[in-house]
Image (tube, rainbow, N blue to C red):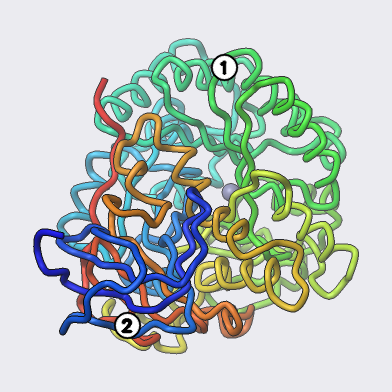
Amino acid sequence: MSADPDIVLRGGRVIDPESGLDAVQDVAVTGGQVTEIRDALPRSQADLNVAGLVVTAGFVDLHSHVNDIAGFSLQALDGVTTALELEAGVSPVQAAYQSAAAEGRPVNYGFATSWALARMEATAGVGLDGRLATFLANLGREAWQRPATPGQITAMLARLSADLADGALGIGVLVGYAPGTDPGEYLQVAGLAAEAGVPTFTHARDLVELAPRTLIDGAEEIVRAAGETGAQMHYCHVNSTSQRHIDRVLRLVSRAQAAGTRVTTEAYPYGSGMTGIGAAFLAPERLGERGLTPSSLTYAPTGERVGSEARLRELRQADPGGLVIIELLDENDPSDRELLMRSLTFPGAIVASDAMPLTWTGTAPDPLAWPLPGTAITHPRTAGTFSRALRLLTRDGGPLGLAEALSKCSLRPARLLQDRVPALRRKGRLQAGRDADIVVLDPATISDQASYLKSTRPSTGIQHVMVNGTFVVRDGNLVAGARPGRPIRAAPR
Ligand SMILES: [Zn+2]
């Protein structure tokens, strides 16, 4: 070994989901990289005793809408070392990378380009600024949800291409929010992704069981695009858009995979979703399609359970981007819980959070205040997805072994992106020569603590988290001011 290590994680159970290593070893970290993993490294000043704990690769979240330090801090406390905005995406990505770099990030970050924002620009003249807030502010407008003209589609594709040239990690396609979109347009977007060699990340259109008048079944559309264009199609949060049709959707995906098309899935372990209250599928006259009523919705900024159709109309009008929690599956119902588990245990399924930006009741405090004041509200998945998934999958007789469950959180998401994104080849595994994105956790106690009422309570059982060799969580506590996160971009071609 050349230089003295910056730190040696000593005596932990080291699990690398790629090589299959699962043994008590020491891990040396030098200059932001893992430099050595073996038994009995020489003792030094740099030792940190992690005996009795698991040392593994940090989690790579493919689906994080978080855009502030507080939100990323909650994710770091859940074991996340890379948080990527891929489903909604942003545009222009250049602006998003610049503002993230200017502010600094505790975890690594990156962006897909956004079909929805490109569509808003082309069909409704919305000005783009690289922020998700611009999507939320406009999601309720009819103008961008209608069929587009060929000229508008050309403009959208040009915008997406420009972002891909600027290093966007893929194309986020929120087609479920614009039900008037022609299925042919979706195929054109998938075709562009295939040409560029990047994945797409889709929030599926309505399933035919839920909305018989949909232009095409949401699951069939994703699978068809994979078959027709050869693009890598990632099916976002299959748990929430499939509701009680998860088995049908997973059978379809399974057949498509067996036939050689590139379709992947992700899920988060909660029965409720969260989105802007102005979303097309939350229109009062459409709630019944999903078996919902206005009272299935809780408006996050006030904690108000929406009391009536009239009140829902009022809120959609006044604050279309206001976040709302939607009860989709009943976590207290054993058969619904089983459905959720099947979306997580599906072979190859990735754990991804769909973490949401924080909403503040009353005036927003100092954005760096920590611990978070009680006036911060989000979906509990923001703070708890990975710990909860590991608890459900591996503790108390859970169905998976630890290495397999961890691979859903780190290796599989890294592999999904790594063809075009060299940085991801160095993440998602714990091996000498890879980036020191490391989580040290207690497999016996790991658990989510956030609930719908206390949505920002950090997870427990995550002891240390390193990003590029720098601690962002140490001894279970956030390291204030640590900003070792780096931008992750696709390689030019
Ligand atoms: Zn979504």
Residue 479 picture quarter: bottom left
Secondary element at image label 2: strand
Is the Cβ of the residue at disc 2 closer than 8 Å to that at disc 1?
no
Three-letter amino acid code of the residue under disc 1:
Gly
Q: Earlier in the sequence, mark 2 or mark 1?
A: 1
> Regarding mark 1 in the picture, which secondary structure is present there?
loop
Residue at 47% from the left image edge and 40% from the top image edge: 415
Q: Does mark 1's beta carbon lie closer than 8 Å to ligand 1?
A: no
What residue is shown with label 2?
A: 474
Which image quarter holds the N terminus? bottom left
Q: Where residue 383 sits: x, y (%)?
A: 50, 73
Q: In the image, 117: left or right of 33?
A: right
Q: Position of residue 345 (x, y in %)?
A: 72, 54
* Observer able to see residue 276: yes
Pick the front one: 262 or 383: 262
Q: Residues within 10 Å of mark 1 (few under 14, many from 20)?
A: some
As shown in the figure, which amino acid type bears the numbered disc 2?
Arg
Identified at 23% across, 65% down, the residue is: 29
Q: Does residue 239 sit above or below 436 in this rendering? A: above
Q: Can residue 215 be seen at all in this image of the molecule? A: no
Q: Is residue 366 left or right of residue 185?
A: left
Relative horizontal placement of residue 216, taking residue 2 as reference (left or right): right
Which is closer to the viewer, label 2 or label 1? 2
Seen from the viewer's position, the closer of residues 315 and 110 is 110
Which part of the image, by quadrant, shows the C terminus?
top left
Q: CA distance from mark 2 to mark 1?
A: 44 Å
Residue corresponding to mark 1: 230
On the image, which quarter does residue 293 sit in?
Answer: bottom right
On screen, 137 above or below 127? below
Residue, x 43% and y 76% (percent of image)?
A: 12
Identify the residue shown where x is 26% and y is 67%: 28
Q: Nearer the viewer, residue 407 or 159?
A: 407
